[in-house]
Image (spheres, rainbow, N blue to C red):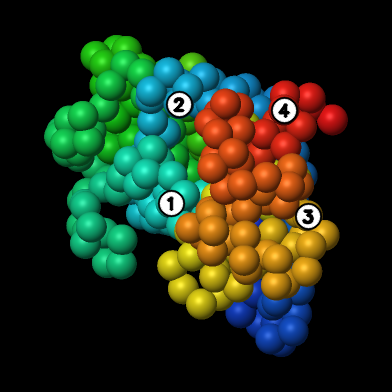
């Protein structure tokens, strides 16, 4: 593959940081902060594509599919980070949102030489997770030309036939050619030339946050702005459950703890019990009736 790095915006020289090594610590931080402020605006411009991607992913998940991220280096790590936080936060299976990185588990913490250049490994990696036509594959590459990600999207689109999304910070990227939806936040040259773990990485993180969070909201994993399917795997989350029930219902702590105990630490069930003044069994029945949507379970289908 012809690199043509000079043509990539992410590889360009940033005029704002040309004298970075001569600046005071405060001024260095100021330059970085000033450049970071551009990231949110670049992502904002992509909201139409991001929202379309969310709707596509949600439709796939409703049909039994999964959301799968794939990338190399920083991009791959960000995908794994987003995927790994979904089960404890939203109580979903670890199979629903998955992250794949070039070079495997070792590459999560250590650079694996040449991993991003392989065009065979991504096919093996996607075969290992049994990529299906019902899934959505999100390819992440700041440059938009990483061979590992290009090959993954090409395989997903033309061999498996599943939906694909690309996230790149360079317009007209190679990965966008294999994407049903191309998300391209143009954040400009990095403060440190070519260090795409900075602005490009931040943009990718913001977008992945939106993809998974909006998916979970649309799937009934959120009531208002509360993570009502949170799994209490530690003391902090145990306390958060209590606070969630109190916030959702306005009840006191004693009732919140009592309801959670009767609901076997299920926030949704406890909330419905309190709001409908019903038993744990009836609350569970309501949630099952309305596919786990707390608001609908409380109002019996009236979306107030």
For the N terminus, give its image quadrant.
Answer: top left
Q: CA distance from mark 3 to mark 2?
A: 30 Å
Q: CA distance from mark 3 to mark 4?
A: 16 Å
The tag earlier along the polypeptide, 3 or 1, is 1
The tag earlier along the polypeptide, 4 or 1, is 1
Q: How many residues crowd around disc 3 within 10 Å: few (fewer than 14), some, or many (20 or more)? A: some
Figure check: 29 above or below 174 = below
Residue 286 x, y percent position in the rendering: 61, 33
Write down the residue under mark 1.
87
What residue is shown at x 59% (from left), y 39% (from top)?
282
Q: Secondary structure at mark 4?
A: loop
Q: Secondary structure at mark 2?
A: helix
Q: CA distance from mark 4 to mark 2?
A: 24 Å
For the residues labelled 4 and 1, say whether their Cβ atoms are less than 8 Å apart. Answer: no
Is 33 left or right of 77, judged from the image as shown?
right
Q: Is residue 181 visible?
A: no
The tag earlier along the polypeptide, 4 or 2, is 2
Q: CA distance from mark 4 to mark 1?
A: 27 Å
Write down the residue under mark 4.
300
Q: Secondary structure at mark 3?
A: helix
For the residues labelled 4 and 2, say whether their Cβ atoms are less than 8 Å apart. Answer: no
Q: CA distance from mark 3 to mark 1?
A: 24 Å
Figure check: 134 above or below 21 = above
What residue is shown at x 38% (from left), y 31% (from top)?
66
Mark 3 vs mark 1: give the one in front.
3
The tag earlier along the polypeptide, 3 or 4, is 3
Q: Secondary structure at mark 1?
A: helix
The tag earlier along the polypeptide, 2 or 1, is 2
Q: CA distance from mark 2 to mark 1?
A: 15 Å
Q: Which mark is residue 249?
A: 3
Write down the residue under mark 2.
61
């Amino acid at each position: 593959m012809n690199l043509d790095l000079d043509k990539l915006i992410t590889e360009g020289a940033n005029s704002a940081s040309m004298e970075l090594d001569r600046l005071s610590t405060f001024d260095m931080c100021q330059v970085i902060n000033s450049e970071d402020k551009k990231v949110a605006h670049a992502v904002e411009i992509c909201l139409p594509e991001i929202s379309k991607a969310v709707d596509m992913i949600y439709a796939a998940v409703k049909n039994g599919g999964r959301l799968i991220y794939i990338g190399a280096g920083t991009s791959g790590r960000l995908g794994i980070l987003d995927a790994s936080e979904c089960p404890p936060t939203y109580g979903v299976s670890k199979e629903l949102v998955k992250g794949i990185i070039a070079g495997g588990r070792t590459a999560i913490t250590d650079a694996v030489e040449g991993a991003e250049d392989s065009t065979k490994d991504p096919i093996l990696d996607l075969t290992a997770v049994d990529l299906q036509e019902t899934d959505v594959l999100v390819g992440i590459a700041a440059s938009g030309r990483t061979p590992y990600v290009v090959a993954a999207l090409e395989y997903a689109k033309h061999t498996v036939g599943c939906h694909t999304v690309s996230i790149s910070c360079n317009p007209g990227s190679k990965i966008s050619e294999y994407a049903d939806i191309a998300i391209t936040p143009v954040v400009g040259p990095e403060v440190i030339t070519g260090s795409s773990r900075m602005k490009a990485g931040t943009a990718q993180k913001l977008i992945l946050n939106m993809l998974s969070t909006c998916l979970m909201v649309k799937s009934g994993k959120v009531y208002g702005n509360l993570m009502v399917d949170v799994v209490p795997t530690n003391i902090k989350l145990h306390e958060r459950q209590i606070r969630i029930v109190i916030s959702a219902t306005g009840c006191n702590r004693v009732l919140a703890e009592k309801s959670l105990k009767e609901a076997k630490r299920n926030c949704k069930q406890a909330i419905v019990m309190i709001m409908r003044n019903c038993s744990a069994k009836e609350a569970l029945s309501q949630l099952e009736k309305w596919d786990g949507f707390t608001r609908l379970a409380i109002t019996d289908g009236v979306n107030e």
